[in-house]
């Protein structure tokens, strides 16, 4: 009962009327007292230090200076009126203070012999610094003491600001709020856990995050709240995982039989890498456990995931089950179909392909063979999840490039079985560990972190646009040696027309530089009809064209081992993971491969960092980590759908240590008390239920 006050609608807070309440709800999703309490500052300004004028630099967001104010003047008239004053610091240097309104109030406000504390954002006019609309207050022991604290800065919006709710306005509201609610804030972590991790109690933490007593207390408060946030996510996913592994059954694949062994001994022309062997073993254990497998397989492009997929499917076959492999596009499904058929040659296993363009008669035949169980391996696109596709006994589902499928889509596939099939999700988009733990915390994760032997690492080079002729020369050289080349242009939706024009211009200039009959150039982009696209793609695959000019439609999965050069135009416009994906299109054959990043001369710092990272490493995990550091986890590939990443205070790119602690503790607690029934864990159980009651579990794939 006592905590009900936290649910009080926000309009009942002092300082919030219906209008402001409306905005708080719409703009920052603050509906009740509790929401405001957990609306944390996004940064703090250190007001513990006073600067002198000579210390000011252009990039300082704020400065705080002590000094005397003199020379107050009104300039201009009407619209252009402004008031200025001179602030002179203790060293005798000065800067200008400027106001554009509020003159009446300011007039006579400043005393000549009074020292003031001036705070604001420094600007540069000519060679002299100024501060517009500074905060000014007289120096007093009180003011200095108070200013020794870190001052919170809250996110606000234009609309909120127009109603007086800028950062300071929000801070004032929270100042009104805390005395009202502080006795009703309940601890949500058990004493034993707080003691063990030396965490601040919740009341102190919430107070200090809004009104830090000092930097040390602030750090502890933030650590405590970050822990809470990450811990409860982990507790929730691990609890779900626990439920899944105790309650849901899985097919047991007892045998490794004829299919698998024949393939392994007769059809595999190379030794598996250590990483591949490890993953096959992991899958083997999963499928023996009696629980449904839910495994995410991460591995860089070309690391050999497909063979692992094929071997998993063969184990299903050896145990009398059917298997399927689903790819996000028709081109990819085709490619998988061809390579799997090739791999299984001579083993007398029928493999069929089902896509949107399969003929009606073929669909019918496939459907019949699936139902009577005579067709064992089906490969395709999301045509596989149509209601007309019914397996006799589906035992293994492999999904390639998982981020292209929605959760609901995936689940449809195995609603058809009473006991769900095992699921292997493959992705070539490496996800940083912290993100994987948070997003897919209830999946088991396998990583292929080793490339097949003998691969020559792709060489990545940065070239400015002005060196294009040199790059063309290099391309001619490679074509002379029999290689093929991709040239990729960005396609970003907001400016699709412009991008298409870029692509067309680029294509024209390449055709001019690489004329028929000596050269043939293909072009592929998203606006083409899918038949035309396929036709061009196939021409390139067959080696009838030497250059493929394309947008990022070729990003995923395409495999042309003879293509050894990837030229990326306007590389500064691509994200890191996309650049890496594109680069993965080459380096698939025995020849030295190249990735050439073309950019303009003017690059933002972030773009520079992306280019440097690409030139510096081929390791997808390093790239994923850097990507997350640069962009923040919220913008990473495929994470937008997930509410889980609306983190209020924790930052997955910086708080790995806290996250690991949180996961470890959640594991330990659930191990002792899986249903959180012990008295000491009651509050925790209530809290996790409250937090996740309404959330869809994104990572649960069955
Ligand atoms: P991924 O799907 O992870 O991008 P693939 O499974 O398509 O990678 O493998 C890429 C290429 O490497 C294929 O031509 C495959 O035959 C080859 N390959 C896979 N594993 C090995 C290995 N252990 N040794 C040598 N070549 C391999
Ligand atoms: Mg692949």
Image (cartoon, helix red, strand yellow):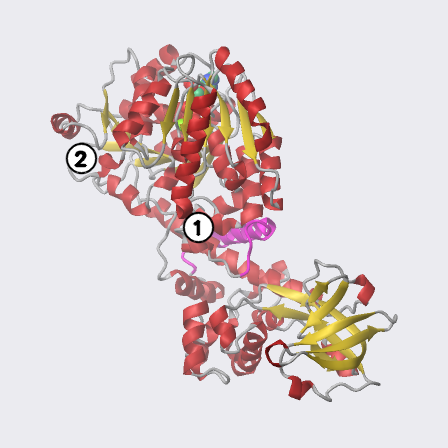
Q: Name the residue tied to disc 2.
A: 389
- 3D distance between C-alphas at marks 1 and 2: 33 Å
* 538 left or right, relative to 616: left
Q: Is residue 652 magenta?
A: yes
Q: Is residue 279 visible?
A: no
Question: Residue placed farthest to the right in the image?
Answer: 91
CB within 8 Å, label 1 to label 2: no
* 542 left or right, relative to 429: left
Few, some or many C-alpha atoms within 10 Å of disc 1 (few <14, some 14-19, many ≥20)? many
Front-most of residues 696 and 372? 696
Q: Name the residue tied to disc 1.
A: 238
Which quarter of the image is occupied by the N terminus?
A: bottom left
Q: Is residue 554 above or below residue 213?
A: above
The region drawn magenta spans 649-676
Q: Chief secondary structure of the magenta span? A: helix
Tell me the mark number nearer the camera, choosing from 1 and 2: 2
């Amino acid at each position: 009962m006592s905590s009900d006050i936290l649910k009080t609608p926000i309009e009942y807070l002092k300082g919030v009327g219906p209008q402001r309440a409306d905005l708080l709800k719409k703009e920052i999703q603050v509906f009740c007292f509790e929401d405001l309490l957990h609306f944390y500052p996004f940064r703090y300004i250190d007001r513990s230090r006073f600067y002198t004028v000579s210390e000011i630099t252009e990039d300082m967001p704020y400065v705080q200076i002590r000094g005397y104010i003199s020379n107050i003047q009104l300039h201009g008239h009407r619209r252009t009126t402004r008031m200025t004053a001179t602030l002179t610091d203790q060293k005798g240097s000065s800067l200008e203070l400027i106001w554009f309104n509020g003159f009446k109030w300011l007039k006579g406000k400043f005393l000549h012999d009074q020292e003031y504390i001036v705070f604001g954002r420094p600007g540069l006019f000519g060679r002299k610094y100024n501060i517009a609309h500074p905060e000014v207050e007289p120096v007093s022991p009180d003011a200095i003491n108070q200013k020794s604290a870190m001052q919170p800065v809250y996110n606000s919006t234009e609309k909120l600001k127009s109603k007086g709710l800028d950062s300071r306005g929000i801070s004032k509201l929270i100042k009104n709020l805390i005395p009202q609610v502080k006795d009703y804030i309940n601890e949500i972590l058990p004493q034993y856990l707080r003691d063990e991790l030396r965490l601040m109690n919740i009341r102190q933490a919430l107070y200090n995050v809004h009104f830090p007593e000092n930097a040390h207390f602030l750090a502890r408060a933030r650590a405590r709240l970050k822990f809470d946030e990450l811990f409860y996510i982990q507790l929730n996913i691990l609890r779900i995982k626990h439920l899944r592994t105790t309650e849901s059954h899985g097919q047991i694949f007892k045998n490794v039989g004829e299919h698998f062994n024949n393939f392994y001994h007769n059809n595999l022309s190379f030794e598996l890498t250590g990483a591949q062997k490890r993953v096959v073993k992991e899958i083997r254990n999963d499928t023996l456990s009696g629980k449904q497998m839910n495994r995410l397989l991460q591995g860089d492009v070309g690391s050999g995931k497909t063979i692992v997929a094929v071997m998993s499917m063969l184990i299903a076959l050896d145990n009398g089950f059917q298997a399927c492999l689903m790819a996000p596009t028709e081109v990819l499904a085709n490619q998988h179909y061809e390579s799997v058929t090739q791999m299984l040659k001579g083993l007398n296993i029928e493999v069929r392909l089902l896509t949107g363009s399969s003929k009606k008669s073929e669909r019918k035949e496939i459907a019949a063979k699936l139902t009577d169980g005579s067709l064992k391996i089906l490969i395709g696109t999301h045509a596989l999840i149509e209601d007309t596709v019914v397996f006799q006994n589906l035992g293994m589902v492999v999904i390639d490039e998982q981020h292209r499928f929605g959760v609901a889509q995936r689940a449809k596939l195995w609603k058809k079985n009473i006991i769900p099939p095992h699921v292997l999700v493959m992705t070539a988009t490496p996800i940083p560990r912290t993100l994987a733990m948070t997003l897919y915390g209830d999946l088991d994760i396998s990583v292929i972190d080793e490339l097949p032997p003998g691969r020559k690492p792709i060489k990545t080079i940065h070239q400015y646009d002005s060196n294009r002729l040199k790059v063309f020369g290099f391309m001619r050289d490679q074509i002379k040696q029999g290689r093929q080349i991709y040239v990729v242009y960005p396609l970003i939706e907001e400016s699709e027309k412009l991008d298409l024009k870029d692509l067309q211009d680029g294509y024209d200039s390449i055709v001019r530089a690489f004329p028929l009959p000596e050269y043939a150039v293909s072009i592929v982009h998203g606006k083409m009809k899918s038949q035309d696209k396929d036709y061009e793609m196939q021409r390139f695959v067959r080696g009838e064209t030497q250059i493929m000019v394309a947008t990022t439609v070729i990003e995923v999965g395409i495999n042309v081992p003879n293509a050894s050069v990837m030229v990326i135009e306007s590389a500064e416009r691509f994200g890191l993971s996309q650049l890496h994906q594109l680069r993965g299109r080459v380096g698939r054959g025995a020849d030295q491969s190249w990735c050439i990043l073309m950019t303009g001369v003017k690059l933002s710092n972030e773009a520079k960092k992306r280019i440097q990272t690409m030139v510096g490493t081929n390791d997808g995990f390093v790239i994923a980590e850097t990507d997350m550091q640069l962009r923040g986890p919220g913008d990473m590939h495929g994470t937008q759908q997930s509410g889980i990443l609306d983190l209020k205070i924790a930052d997955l790119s910086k708080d790995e240590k806290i996250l690991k602690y949180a996961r470890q503790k959640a594991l330990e607690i659930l191990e002792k008390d899986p249903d959180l029934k012990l008295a000491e864990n009651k509050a925790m159980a209530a809290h996790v239920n409250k937090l996740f009651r309404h959330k869809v579990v994104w990572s649960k794939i069955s």
